[in-house]
């Protein structure tokens, strides 16, 4: 509707005064302050303006008897209502006509229409652009954002903003970091190389007009990197085959279990079912050069099987009875490593001989073991602050190769692996040569190695760094997620890894297996 500024006051007068206890009179020296919109604000015709104003210095405790009117171009009333008790009003107004106009807000006490409190005047620009539509392409290391072409009549620029979703505030909108800007109307894509795999990124494209109006695409999300969800964790894998470049995990079910085999290069998965029968506990043990080893347990019987990595044929390896709480730790060659009551044993399946391993009876259990299948080396705790590395020997007792204290906290935790390849051995924070001479040590008490390349030239650590084994200099840093095991491709140019969580504890999706080409 259209009314004049003066008519508003007369209208208020005609409403009369409340009888009884009248509200206090606002001091004539009060100020009506317009916070929003800012002067020269430009919006799209499909957008809204936020109007926020409040009274100051009125010398009353309650302003709720004041009426407000939002005025456009001195004659049009866009909205009306009452101030709240504290003298505030906040509204959003949309469907505005295209063009430039002035707005202000007045507040009136209907009893005294001559007392009109008016804010300052703000100029608003309403212009029009089509809403851009964005889409995505991505590879292992980047996300490409594409968008539709703007209307040429009033085009000024494209602006692209991004926010990593784990940093988004659930309570208020904050525009992200500007990563691209272009005045070329035909430039319709941008490749974002700053992303870290594992995380999702929210992108927003703004089309800016000559009048500085902004039309937004809205936010759309894309997860960085090439990955698959990990179907099994803990005793169920995933395990990695260097020879086949595949991941093996065990997905448990009510009636049967399934081994998931994921190609590290294509991330495609095939499934091999295994019969659960009457066995109550199933788990993967390790993957060798030619077989995946797993066990089925139903106390007191433990059955161990091997699945051929090429044909996927499953054959029984060994069956034996053991007391409850016996844990099979590994199968190394023709030897089974198991523990019972905190003592560890090595059973030679070929000879039937059992050796008691030199493990302290007061310390060490399932979590305190690390095994390298390529060399038949096993690391185990000796005392609460020391460990030893030994190699199994066919037909004779295992031989201790190395024994020393370790100072890194949790040096034999589930995350710490024994890695041997290319004449190097990595364990905990230490890097050894083949004779167990220390050739490098990671700084800090909580650092440890997570991967070793097949040729021994590179190692990775739990800080998501890839290092040269010659001097432990950093060759690359990748992501900032919590990373478990890291595996190198044959040419060392790609790593395959598992992430377990985010540094931001509020953002912890399920574990994922990622492929990341780090070397060009």
Image (cartoon, grey):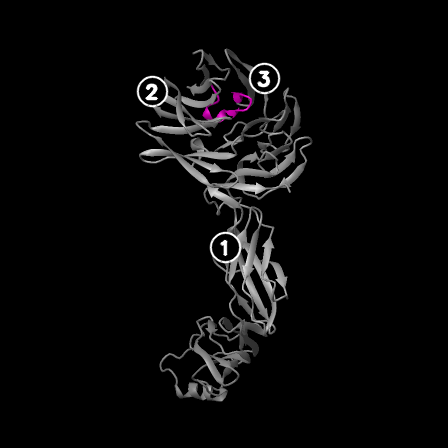
Q: Whole-Å distance between the Cαs marked 1 and 3? A: 52 Å
Above or below: residue 370 compared with residue 142: above
Q: Magenta residues, as a range? A: 362-382
Q: Choose between 260 and 419: the one closer to the eye.
A: 260
Residue 327 appears anywhere in the view:
yes
Q: Could you tell me which residue is drawn at 50 percent across and 30 percent down? A: 414
Residue wearing tag 2: 300
Residue wearing tag 1: 221
Crowdedness of circle 2 by 10 Å Cα count: few (<14), some, many (20+)? few
Give the mark nearest the N terminus, 2 or 3. Answer: 2
Q: Position of residue 402 (x, y in %)?
A: 59, 18
Q: Whole-Å distance between the Cαs marked 2 and 3? A: 34 Å
- SS of the residue under disc 2: loop
Above or below: residue 143 compared with residue 90: above
Q: Position of residue 95 (x, y in %)?
A: 46, 75
Residue wearing tag 3: 401
Quarter of the image holding residue 448? top right
């Amino acid at each position: 509707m259209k009314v004049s500024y003066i008519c508003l006051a007369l209208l208020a007068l005609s409403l009369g005064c409340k009888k009884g206890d009248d509200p206090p009179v606002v001091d004539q020296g009060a100020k009506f302050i317009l916070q929003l919109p800012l002067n020269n604000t430009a919006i799209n015709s499909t957008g809204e303006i936020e109007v926020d104003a409040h009274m100051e210095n009125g010398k009353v405790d309650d302003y709720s008897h004041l009426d407000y009117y939002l005025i456009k171009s001195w004659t049009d009333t866009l909205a009306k209502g009452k101030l709240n008790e504290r003298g505030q009003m906040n509204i959003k107004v949309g469907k505005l006509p295209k063009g430039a106009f002035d707005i202000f807000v007045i507040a009136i006490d209907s009893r005294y229409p001559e007392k009109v409190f008016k804010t300052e005047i703000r100029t608003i620009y309403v212009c029009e652009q089509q809403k851009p539509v964005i889409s995505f392409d991505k590879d292992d290391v980047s996300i490409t954002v594409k968008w539709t072409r703007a209307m040429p009549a009033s085009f000024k620029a494209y602006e692209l903003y991004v926010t990593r979703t784990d940093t988004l505030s659930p309570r208020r909108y904050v525009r992200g970091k500007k990563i691209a800007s272009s005045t070329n109307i035909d430039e319709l894509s941008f490749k974002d190389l700053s992303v870290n795999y594992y995380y999702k990124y929210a992108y927003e494209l703004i089309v800016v007009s000559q009048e500085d109006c902004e039309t937004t695409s809205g936010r759309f999300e894309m997860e960085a990197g090439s990955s698959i969800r990990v179907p099994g964790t803990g005793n169920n894998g995933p395990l990695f085959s260097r020879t086949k470049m595949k991941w093996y995990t065990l997905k448990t079910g009510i009636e049967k279990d399934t081994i998931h085999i994921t190609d590290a290069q294509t991330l495609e998965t095939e499934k091999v079912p295994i019969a659960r029968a009457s066995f109550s506990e199933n788990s993967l043990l390790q993957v060798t050069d030619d077989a995946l080893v797993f066990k089925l347990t139903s106390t007191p019987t433990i059955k161990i099987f091997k699945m051929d990595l090429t044909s996927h044929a499953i054959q029984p390896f060994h069956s034996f009875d053991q007391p409850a709480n016996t844990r099979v730790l590994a199968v190394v060659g023709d030897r089974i490593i198991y523990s019972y009551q905190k003592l560890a044993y090595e059973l030679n399946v070929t000879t039937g001989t059992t050796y008691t391993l030199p493990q302290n009876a007061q310390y060490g259990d399932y979590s305190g073991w690390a095994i390298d299948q390529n060399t038949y080396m096993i690391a185990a705790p000796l005392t609460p602050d020391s460990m030893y590395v030994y190699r199994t020997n066919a037909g004779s007792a295992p031989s201790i190769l190395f024994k020393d204290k370790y100072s890194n906290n949790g040096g034999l935790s589930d995350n710490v692996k024994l890695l041997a390849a290319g004449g190097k051995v990595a364990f905990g924070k230490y890097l050894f040569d083949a004779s167990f001479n220390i050739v490098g040590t990671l700084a800090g008490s909580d650092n440890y190695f997570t991967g070793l390349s097949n040729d021994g030239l590179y190692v990775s650590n739990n800080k998501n760094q890839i290092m040269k084994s010659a001097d432990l200099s950093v060759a690359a840093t990748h992501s900032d997620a919590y990373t478990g095991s890291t595996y190198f491709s044959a040419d060392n140019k790609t790593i395959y890894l598992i992430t377990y969580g985010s540094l931001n504890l509020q953002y912890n999706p399920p574990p994922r297996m990622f492929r990341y080409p780090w070397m060009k």
